[in-house]
Amino acid sequence: MTISIIWAAGTRSGSEFAVTLTEAAFRPKLLEEIKVSAARESFVKETRTHAPITFDEALVLGRTADAIKIEEPTIDDWLDRFLQAYPCAKIIGTYRPLERVIRSHQRLKDSWGFHEDRVVSLFEDRLRLYERLALTGAFFLIPIEEPKDFCSGAFLDFLGVEATLEFQDHVARWPVINDTQHLLTLSQYAGYSVPSEASSSQVARPNVKRRYEELVRESNRPRNASA
């Protein structure tokens, strides 16, 4: 067993949906996974808790795993080091509009949510990382907020698997991730207020948005389509 898939995504950017979508594509096989948070803590399935983990510990666990999720892959060199250890691994990223990521972090500002400036910085850092990974031909970008821009066939070809009923059902039930109505509904029960839209100064980055959207189109182009 060896790491063949690496999910490299930002926090509050749909990384868990990327994981479950990939899992559905491999059914009935169950993927052995490692999940590392932005705090560099791993999820322990047996106790459903998180525990600090070092890179070397994660590398050892990787010897008996199929996949690893690395949140906020630009904050250190873990991703590059995993790719050195597993050069044939395929990398899956996610794209969620910046203003949505900012709002999602604002909702968590009293616990672990990131300050807006850090969200913006990490968002742009991931774009540079994704551009570099796209040149390898072993990268796929999932448009978390726009299922109409997702190409199932391209994703399955990328993974090298056939469509499963569970995968088709997963795509058909594409979730709404923290949109306004969802947050309003949750707020009625959780007792928090819905954050306002991010300021225009933070989201007015047309070149960054345009490049993300271009990467989405490049990933989701059917493999038999002309360049």
Image (cartoon, rainbow, N blue to C red):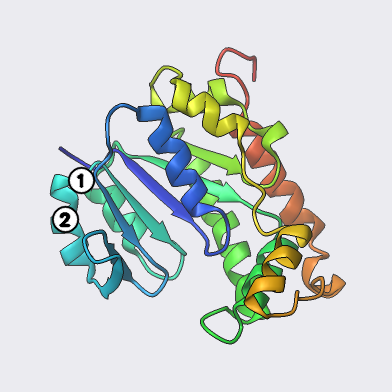
SS at circle 2: helix
User: As drawn, is 59 to the left or to the right of 219?
Assistant: left
Residue on which disc 2 sits: 61
Q: CA distance from mark 1 to mark 2?
A: 7 Å
Residue 217 at x, y percent in the picture:
67, 33
Q: Quadrant of residue 102?
A: bottom right
Residue 43 at x, y percent in the picture:
30, 64
The kind of residue on which mark 2 rests is: Leu
User: Which quadrant is the N terminus positioned in?
Assistant: top left
Q: Is residue 226 above or below residue 73?
A: above
Outermost residue, right direction?
200
Q: Is residue 149 above or below residue 11?
A: above
Residue on which disc 1 sits: 65
Near mark 2 (Cα within 10 A), the count class, few <14, some 14-19 or many ≥20, is some
Q: Is residue 182 visible?
A: yes
Tag of residue 8: none
Determine whether label 1 and label 2 are within 8 Å by CB.
yes
Near mark 1 (Cα within 10 A), the count class, few <14, some 14-19 or many ≥20, is some
**Residue located 42% across and 32% down the image:** 24
**Residue located 17% across and 65% down the image:** 56
SS at circle 1: loop
The kind of residue on which mark 1 rests is: Ala
